[in-house]
Amino acid sequence: MLQKENIDRRQFLKRAGVAAAGVVGFPYFVSSFALGKAGGVAPGDRITIGVIGTGLQGVSNLKGFMVKSGAEVVAVCDVDAGHRQEAREIAGLDARSAYNDFRELLARNDIDAVVVATPDHWHVPISIAAAKAGKDIFCQKPLTLTIAGGRALCDAVRRYGRVLQTGSQQRSSDNFRFACELVRNGRIGKVHTVEVGIPGNNRTCGSTWTPEPVPKGFDYDFWLGPAQWAPYTEQRCHYQFRFILDYSGGQVTNWGAHHLDIAQWGLGMDDSGPVEVTGDGEFPTTGLFTTATRVYFECKYANGAKLICQTQSGGSGTKFEGTEGWLYVSRHGLEAEPASLLTETIGIGEIHLYESRDHKQDFLDCIKLRKDPIAPAEVGHRSATICHLGNIAMMLKRKLRWDPDKERFINDEQANSMLSRPMRAHRHL
């Protein structure tokens, strides 16, 4: 375990604004691996990890970190007992290392870093709590539910000196980095348009749905957390949450968070954003799901470049169009016109972007080096901001002017009221 200030558990829970009665008294753990047994890495070099949210993506992250040399998953947390049990068994942990309440995991002073793979509406509250607790953070995309929440998280990460990696793993892929280097070095001339295609919703809910009893072992009230109370139905939770605006932003924040992130990277806008956004999407008028079923929005940058994000059939990816050619990059590869771009070499004196070949390893390396990884908080926040701007513009259906420095809409209080969400008074916040 990396050395850190010893934080008393009761004091941490009090700092988190929670009564300590009834939640302290959970055991303190030091694993045999931490003591240098079982052929493990020396304690000072080993990074101990807790995984918060152990559904499909969380288990994938758990397995990914388990195979990293010098890292060990020592705790898991989920409000679904079934998911929690599965994750505990995969990680080979005893029952005392599996939690329903993320605050209990954060209070352990033998944990260096956490993975946050919960539904989107919990990303910022848990990540800020983790930063305050002295943990480094690997948080899944989209990093945020709202623009205001993203700024608060960036401020907290900076204030507490933490390392945060956003789960935008395309930045750790050679073809995405090479495409953005070609664009940034002017190989396609001046960029005038970036087109981002995303898939349509892959879950549907009819015009009617019926409240259901909450399954045994599922802490549904905790799952809702800061979101407004709503009756339980199976389709509300787990993967389907991303198609309900109270918890996510549809495919705009799902696949859009990946491909819009690459658009930002290629345009050199990691610490900024557009100055104007317009949208004309379609939203359900009945049923459980509320995110856009047809996506179309445009962003304009101060340098004149235009970004278009829209629903498209087939694959999804990012296309950069310039005065001298174009580049299209996706998880299937890289295409270009002229095709000779694909054999170009980025010279010594040209722009070379941060190189990561393994997103999780980059996070672990940066924990040891105490430096920003390839997708730090500011990058995750700015890329998520494009998603949120698009959704807001599609809902309001008018041109909006945006100040990327102040992170406010210009002369539009209705739009500014959508930069944050009211949070439900809740026992776990």
Image: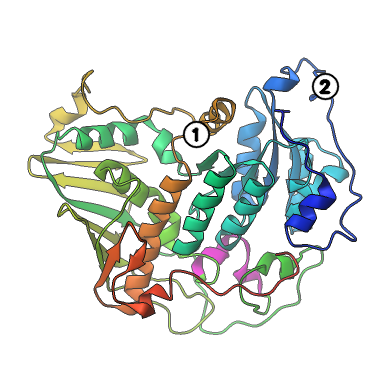
Mark sitting on residue 359: 1
Q: Which residue lies at the image location 76% right of the left edge and 77% below the top edge?
A: 213
Q: Quadrant of the C terminus?
A: bottom right
Which disc number belongs to residue 124?
Answer: none
Q: Does the magenta stretch include residue 29?
A: no
Looking at marks 1 and 2 on the same chain, the residue that comes earlier in the sequence is marked by 2
The relative height of residue 52 versus residue 69 in the rendered view (above or below) is: below
Hey, which quadrant is residue 395 in on the image?
bottom left
Seen at 84% across and 51% down, the residue is 10
Please state if 351 lies on the left or on the right of 18 as rendered: left
Residue 35's disc number: 2
Provide residue 8's location: percent of width, then percent of height: 82, 44
Q: What residue type is labelled 1?
A: His
State which quadrant residue 67 falls in: top right
- Identify the amino acid type marked 2: Leu
The CA distance from mark 1 to mark 2 is: 28 Å
The secondary structure type at the circle numbered 1 is helix
| Quarter of the rendering occupied by the N terminus | top right
Where's residue 339, x and y in %?
15, 32
* Residue 170 in view (yes/no): yes
Mark 1 or 2, closer to the camera = 2
Q: Where is residue 333 in the image (x, y as percent from the top left)?
A: 31, 36
* Place of residue 268 in the rendered image (x, y in percent of width and height, measured from the top left): 27, 42
Q: Residue at x 51, y 30 (%)?
A: 362
- Element under disc 2: loop
User: Which residue is pictured at 56% across the width and 50% down the height?
Assistant: 156
Q: Furthest residue to the left?
A: 323
What is the magenta range?
A: 233-243
Whether residue 202 appears in this view of the structure is no
